[in-house]
Amino acid sequence: MQERRKSPRVQCRLHCKLRSGRQRIAARVLDVSEGGLCVLSPTVLRRGEDVQVVIDVPRVGPVAVDATIWHIRTGK
């Protein structure tokens, strides 16, 4: 399958927290690009759900990004 992204991905393994309403989920950012990021989460979120991703950036501290869930892939 051919890659359709407009921006290259940068792989990483950064800790983060997902905030959706009252829900707080510890997760991990696996890659990031100009157009989005891939997050590994123990909780399945809904497509179209708005979340805040608070990324623990080394030597910088927490960085908050507002995002909308676009693609979901489960291990099932």
Image (spheres, grey):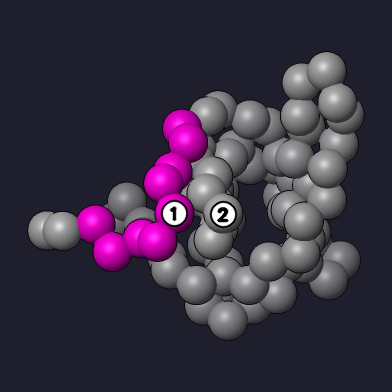
The residue indicated by pointer 1 is 7
Residue at left offset 83%, top offset 51%: 64
Q: Nearer the viewer, residue 7 or 16?
A: 7
- Between the residue at mark 1 and the residue at mark 2, the CA separation in whole angstroms equals 6 Å
Q: Badge 2: few (under 14), some or many (20 or more) residues near its Cα, within 10 Å? A: few
Q: As drawn, is 29 to the left or to the right of 65? A: left
Q: Which comes before the other along the chain, label 1 or label 2?
A: 1
When the figure is inspected, residue 25 is found, relative to residue 4, above or below; the finding is above
Give the residue type at disc 2. Glu
Point out the image quarter for the N terminus.
bottom left
Residue 41 in the image: state x and y as whole percent: 55, 48
Q: Badge 1: few (under 14), some or many (20 or more) residues near its Cα, within 10 Å? A: few
Residue farthest bottom in this picture: 48
Q: Find numbered disc 2 in the image and state the secondary structure of the residue it sits on.
A: loop
The residue indicated by pointer 2 is 34
Name the main secondary structure of what is drawn in magenta. Answer: loop
Q: Find numbered disc 1 in the image and state the secondary structure of the residue it sits on.
A: loop
Specify whether residue 72 is in view: yes
Give the residue type at disc 1. Ser
Residue at left offset 86%, top offset 26%: 60
Q: Nearer the viewer, residue 59 or 38?
A: 59
Residue at left offset 77%, top offset 32%: 56
Q: Give the range drawn in magenta.
A: 3-11
Residue farthest left in this picture: 1
| Disc 1 and disc 2 in contact, CB within 8 angstroms | yes
Q: Does the magenta stretch include residue 23?
A: no
Residue 7 in the image: state x and y as whole percent: 44, 54
Q: As drawn, is 44 to the left or to the right of 60? A: left
Residue 20 in the image: state x and y as whole percent: 77, 67
Q: Which of 65 and 7 is in front in this view?
A: 7
When the figure is inspected, residue 68 is found, relative to residue 8, above or below; the finding is below
